[in-house]
Each structure stands twice: as C-alpha cells, then as structure tokens.
Image (tube, helix red, strand yellow):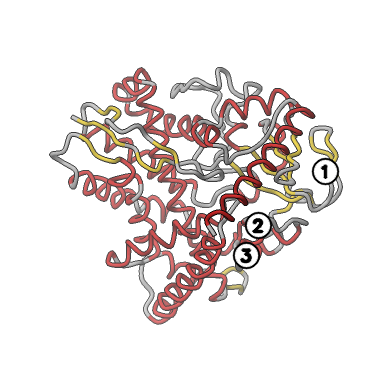
Amino acid sequence: MALRNAITGAARSVYIHARLAGEWLRTGVAWWPLAPSFVADPYPAYRRLRERDPVHYSALTQQFVVSRFADLDRILRDHRNFSNDLQRARSSRGSLGTRKKLRPSMLSQDPPDHTRLRGLVNKAFTPRSVAKMEGYIRDTAHRLLDEVEGTDEFDLMKGFAIPLPTIVIARMIGVPERDLDRFKVWSDRLARALEPLLTPEEQEAVFRTDQQLAEYHMAIIEQRRHEPRDDLVSRLVEAEEQGDKLTSDETIVMLRLLLIAGNETTTNLIGNGVRALLQNPGQLALLREQPDMLPSAVEELLRFDSPVQLDMRIARRDLEVGSRAVRAGTLISLAIGSANRDPERFQRPDELDITRSDQGNISFGRGIHHCLGAPLARLEGRIALEVLLERFDKIGFGARPPKYRPSVVLRGLEHFDVRVA
C-alpha cells in the first residue's frame, strides 16, 4: 500500500509539473496556489499574473484566474452575468463537488433567493446589535491576555487571535461557554470545504460535521422559539419581512455561514495584521503615537495581507472578461489578494501605510454579496489591536518563525509566537 501511494503521488507530481510547464510556455506564468512558496508569500505570483496574463486560464484547475482590481470590482458587482450558484458550474472537481452536496447558504445563492434571505438576516444583524458587542469584545480581549500575563512569549494565534472571534460569535449565537471547544473544531472542519482540494477523509469530516452542527443548532432554535433571548438565534427566528420568515433549515444554514465567517476572517485579520505591523516597525510606532488611526490601520491591514484571498463566480453565459472569451458554466477565481496589491488602484501597493489616502480594499467583496459581517470583523480587529497596544509596551517576533496554514482561500497563520514586555 505504501509503495502504491508513493507511485501514485509521484505520478501526480509529474502530471502537475507538466501541466504547469505548459501554462508557463503559453502565457509566461503558471497558477498553482498549493505550492509551498505560494502559501508562504503569494504576492510575487500575483504580480506576475497581473503583468503577464491578468485573465489567466489554468488548465490544471480548469478555471480562469482574474487578478486586476478593475476586473474584480466589475465582476463582483455584476450578479446578472456572474453567478454565486455552485450548481451552475460545469465542474465538480475538488471541494466544489463537496460544497455542491451541502445545503446552499446565502453566499451560494443568486436573486431572488439571495435577496429574500439577505433582507431577513439584515433585520437580525443590524449595526446597533454589532455596536452593542463592543464592551463584551474588549472585556474578552483583556481576559484572554490576562491568561498569558507574566509570560514574555506566547503564541498570538492560540492565545488570542483564534479564541477571541470564537467566543464573540458564540456569544452572539447563544452558545454556552462549555461548548466552545467543539464549536471551534466544527468551524475549522467546515472551513476546509472552501479549499480547492480535500482528501476523502476531509470530505467525510465536512459532511459529518455539518450534520452535527445542524442537530446542535436545531436544539437551540427550538428552545428560542419558546424562550427568546437577546442573541442572534432569537433575532433570526423572529426575523420577518412582508410576512416571510426563515425556515428552520434556512436558519441552520445561516448559522453555519456566520460561524465560519465570524471565526476565520477576524482571526486572520488579527494574525496577519500584527505580523505586518511587526515587519514595519515605523508603522507600529506611528499607530502607538496616534491611536485614533486604528480604523484606518485596520483598512490598510485588510488590504495588505487579505484574510480572504480568493472568491469565486460562475459565468452565467458566454461572455468576455478582459478580452478573454469565457464559456457559460466556467469557474472564475477572483484573486482578492492580488487586487488589493494592484498598482493601477493603489500607490506603492507593496508598502504598508496606515495613513494611506487611496483606501478602498476589496477584502469584504462588492455588490449584493458584500460581507454581512464586515462591521463585526472591523470592530473586533480594531479592539484587538487597541488592547494589544494598551497591554504591551513592546511587541516583537518570538523565537519560532510564524508559519502560514497550507490553505488557499483563507490566508492565516498556523502559529505566531510573539515576545512582549
């Protein structure tokens, strides 16, 4: 068995390299986001894409990769020509086949279904309800740092960036603290479904976890129908517009979406953001001197090392993107991380500048699918930085170099040791 796996692995590697070599000869650039060098630092590869083939067809992944800001901005705003409905895709390769089998969330639906769901959920996810969380977020951030007080070095991801958004979204949903550990495990397993390649074991874990989470949420939903509380589940159950309500299945799927989005984006924003500031000590010093620049700093950190690197659309009909013909049903990968470093949109795009005047990152999308939880992520990111700078006069890299997780869609650190004083 080991020999067979080794032979299979070697044959797969030869096949991948052959296809990539063909891409390079044809266009001057190759797209393979699972390469270790890309995981560590995708931005040089994005630059080559923008310069040499900004609407690049990857024969290996059977999709177009769009890398310029203007093209992404247009596609994200144009839901009439570019669909979020995975069932429209001709391909079912990799994780796409897994995601097609899951009950679709609002993120994977087009109008009118998306319009209806978004309208209902907006009633439960208002700016006022997010603003009410500020005190709790700040208290939680301090409590987490209390647990590492007295140590001069700790893993920022494990001790702070990961648990903070988990605790916050759990509080919003109404999950008791005793269930936080398995809540995070479920979130991590389901987030893997966003990545392009899954092992059979990971696919099975996604389906099993989806069922476990659905059963867990169903119990909470039924309880809130009879005993409403001041939490997100109660607001979703009560959400109503023009006599329409969310069904139990729709509420369960919405909670699944909020669980993943509420954890991953903010965790990556905190980890990637602190790393970027430590790499740019002048910017960190400026932020300490002018803490009123925190909102601007969060926007720049979102742009500089985007928590979500890729989004996806499906061509609704035969059309053109940047003079390239795209057939109906073709997958289009939108390289958000590349668009946020596009020199045609941002001056000195590879420099971190919290005073930047040309803001307008695309990290939370555009159009009708603009991230519903963006205000919460921004609030958590701002408070996390504020509390870190308040608690520690000095923050630096620890002995162990930070390491990014081997993921493509969500860019975040596996571990990140920091030295504090």
Q: At 42% across and 74% down in the image, what residue appears?
A: 216
Do the numbered discs 3 and 2 sit on residues whose CB atoms are within 8 Å?
Answer: no
Residue beneath disc 1: 326
Question: Residue 104, which numbered label?
Answer: 3
Residue 115 visible, this orientation: no
Q: Is residue 245 above or below residue 415?
A: below
Left or right: residue 19 versus residue 241 is right
| Residue 43 percent across, percent down from the top left | 56, 28
Identity, as a three-letter code, of the amino acid under mark 2: Leu
Counting residues from the start of the chain, the first of labels 1 and 3 encountered is 3
Q: Is residue 9 above or below residue 246?
A: above
Q: In this view of the protein, can residue 381 be seen by the observer?
A: yes
Give the residue number, with chain letter if any, for mark 2.
96
> Of the residues tagged 3 and 2, which is closer to the observer?
2
The quadrant the N terminus occupies is bottom right
- Which marked residue is nearer to the observer: mark 2 or mark 1? 2
Q: Mark 1: give few (<14), some (14-19) or many (20+) Cα within 10 Å.
A: many
Residues at circles 1 and 3 in contact by the CB criterion of under 8 Å:
no
Q: Amino acid at mark 3?
A: Pro
Label 2–label 1 contact, CB within 8 A:
no
The span from disc 3 to disc 2 (Cα, nearest Å) is 12 Å
